[in-house]
Amino acid sequence: MNKLPNIKTHFPEWYQEVIYQAELVDQAPVRGCMVVRPYGNDIWESIKGVMDKKIKDTGHKNAIFPLLIPQSFLQKEADHIEGFAPEVAVVTHAGGKELAEPLIVRPTSETIVHFMFARWIKSWRDLPLKINQWANVVRWEMRPRAFIRTTEFFWQEGHTAHAARKEAEEEVLLMLSHYKDLAENYLAIPVIIGRKSEGEKFPGAEKTYTFEGFMPDGKALQMGTSHLLSQSFAHAFEMTFQDEQGTVQHPWLTSWGCTTRLVGALVMVHGDDKGLVLPPRIAPIQVVIVPIYKTDEDKKLVLDKAQEIKNQLGEGVRTLIDTDDKKTPGNKFYHWELRGVPVRIEIGPRDLQNNQVTCADRLGIKEAVSLDTIIQYIPQKLDALHHALYDRAKNRLTEQWIQRETLQEILDGSEATLTQTGFCESRPCEVVLKEHKLSIRCLLEEEKKHTTCFNCKAPSTKDAIIARSY
Amino acid sequence: MNKLPNIKTHFPEWYQEVIYQAELVDQAPVRGCMVVRPYGNDIWESIKGVMDKKIKDTGHKNAIFPLLIPQSFLQKEADHIEGFAPEVAVVTHAGGKELAEPLIVRPTSETIVHFMFARWIKSWRDLPLKINQWANVVRWEMRPRAFIRTTEFFWQEGHTAHAARKEAEEEVLLMLSHYKDLAENYLAIPVIIGRKSEGEKFPGAEKTYTFEGFMPDGKALQMGTSHLLSQSFAHAFEMTFQDEQGTVQHPWLTSWGCTTRLVGALVMVHGDDKGLVLPPRIAPIQVVIVPIYKTDEDKKLVLDKAQEIKNQLGEGVRTLIDTDDKKTPGNKFYHWELRGVPVRIEIGPRDLQNNQVTCADRLGIKEAVSLDTIIQYIPQKLDALHHALYDRAKNRLTEQWIQRETLQEILDGSEATLTQTGFCESRPCEVVLKEHKLSIRCLLEEEKKHTTCFNCKAPSTKDAIIARSY
């Protein structure tokens, strides 16, 4: 293994190298696609487990919709086709023949889901209909970066239909709040939530809400979105229901999703010079026990104690004993630090004589812990580490988050910061940001600190968060 | 809802109708594809849960490989391309341009997995490499049937590499034994396991093992396979390792998979005139409680008791209380019978006065059970139902399974049977079956009851199972 690039001076290179060295991912032989290796997949399965429970606990059901969608479906909603047409992959031949109508590999599933919804929804009794899908999607990607932006990626996409606009709006905000909880209370990533501007919203949405993470380099990462869809989807797919009074109406639709990008987010937000630092509630391995011995007699003593600790920690703590005899303890320390395991327990014969073990957390605190208290110590340590990681990221975000009044101030500011400013919500004032590689990440719904637009000086209608982005 | 077609006289129609009425699946707007509805997906998630644990407990790791594969990859192994070329879907355009090299949507992942294995395997220390993937695959299908044969289907595909042929052979048989366990001890489906003939093995395999289920109509259903791959894959992808002595060798490869077809299998094997009959260990809902009341006072009493029973059964039993006030109890009985829920508990005010509930199992046994023993009764009942379903299917298989000596006997026999006979293992004697819409389902490795080939009368080398198939 090579030394990792300096995280402060070479952040993009550090990211590319750390995800490769920690064996999260490998480059696929198809441009822009990734192979998610077992350790990367374990992290994704861990995130999926948390989100899947949230989705089910809020009354949604998982289903599976087809990968291939007739090209004509995409064309039924005007904004949707305009947004996605440039990036779709198209199947033109199958079964040895040219197809009469080309099929697209789904870039997202609104069209096919709505086609089926129209078949399933007849009456108010069929509503709300609340479906989720875990799936792969394909969007042709010109500037790929593993996890962050890949041609094929993996996600959940929720799709719901409601009898009333108010219900649909509540659904959109409910799922946004669960995303915020996932980010902050599991990934230990503080996020800014808000509404997307007209220029940034989902193609076909009336309103898009987002939760945005901010990376150490100041760039925003859109971590997931929740949309109130335009009624035009219901019209395009002739989706109607009879309400309780017998009147025919169009349902109100939502969709919301988060992706494998979350794996990239936690790598960037928490990692350091030694490699990954995984948030404990998501880490596939929370505790690694490294036995240290020279004689066979010591080996037995130490391994027995390691197994005893693992058993006592039980299923509530994901513990691995590294018994690999081909590696030195030092090699193992390096191996698991690179992979971001939150806590390491070292057990040697001298430790056992002193009725203790050595615990080292991934942030560098190392202490002797009595065997009488280790079982209580570990869950508390994992919890403390979660909060330490969150607080560290939150402090950085607070430092990066600058109030600015004018475009010039924004341009003069450090690249590693994000701006809160006033915005008139007009398109020209949004478009002007593009040439400076900036964009409006979201509009703050609740807070208003600025009275004039950063660009045109007209009265500000919303405070906006402006940053560079991934 | 319409009445189901007669299962005895119209089995194919019954199947199509029951999976639709029970809301397992719906037809997709792309020919040959299916939409798996929530209840069908719940069954599949239940099967996945069992199999995923088996895969992990045997030391395999999940990973994710790309959906899209360069066309040239498929051509690297001669038998593989010959087998799959006629049924692949091809992406020729993406990102608004024609691609320099077309990409195929994976029909299976050996080629891309082996490409990556070649990158990851350098030394005997890297072996065995044991990977699994849960994924969607596409094979263009001319005669689609939901779950059984669909253009897009869902599966797990295991891929492993070993230093020695013996190890690879052990892996192939180990995973076959886990499939048999899944079929018999979870799906309650007795299976015949054996080796595929030359004409039926996987394109690119040296040996294919199969577990075959037999449906009430006598047709075989290949429920999954486990392959020792030809060394040509390792050669094609230049996959080598240094053994402990420093000699460069090619690893030995296996692959094995089972699919959403298993959902179709359990529908066909266990279903009856009233609908699905789900094996209890897989059923997403194992017990449905139907409260019966007329007054509000009774409603409260009955629902409280229902909740108490559900709580006492705990997480070990998947219990649903059907509180839908828009349906009569009779409607609910019908609804859950159609969906194959193994046990129904009816609770009415008179039951409560008698300190009892009424339990009806899906095979028609109905009895009063004391509230003092209901918590012990339910798990025992679920277990007994599993065995009853297995035994019923096993008895049918025993009746269907006929020893025959000649092709004429096979042709004269009832279509609803399968044949065990002698086979010389030559291609001509296998090909002759095709014109009669029969095939060799597997060769029995351990049992030999016949001395001459059913067709050419040469000495038999293996007993073969011959049947029509799905």
Image (spheres, coloured by chain):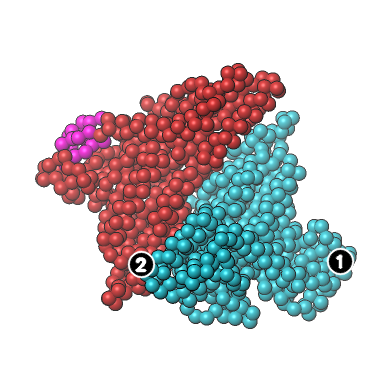
Chain colours: A red, B cyan
A53 over B148 or under it: above or below: above
Q: Which image quarter holds the N terminus of chain A?
A: top right
SS assignment at label 1:
loop
B333 over B242 or under it: above or below: below
Q: Which residue is mark 2?
A: A127
The answer to whether any part of residue B195 appears in the image is: yes
Q: Position of residue A464 (x, y in %)?
A: 21, 43
Q: Which mark is residue A191?
A: none
Q: Examine the image and state in which quarter residue B409 appears.
A: bottom right
**Mark 2 falls within which chain?**
A
B96 over A5 or under it: above or below: below
Tell which of B233 and A159 is nearer to you.
Answer: A159
User: Going 72% across and 71% down the picture, which residue do you hit?
Assistant: B396
Q: Position of residue B186 (x, y in %)?
A: 63, 58
The answer to whether any part of residue B151 appears in the image is: no
Span shown in magenta: A402-422
Give yes or no for contact between labels 1 and 2 (Cβ–Cβ under 8 Å): no
Q: Which residue is mark 1?
A: B450
Q: What amino acid type should be assigned to the residue bearing mark 1?
A: His
User: Going 51% across and 75% down the picture, which residue do you hit?
Assistant: B334
What is the C-alpha distance between the residues marked 1 and 2?
61 Å
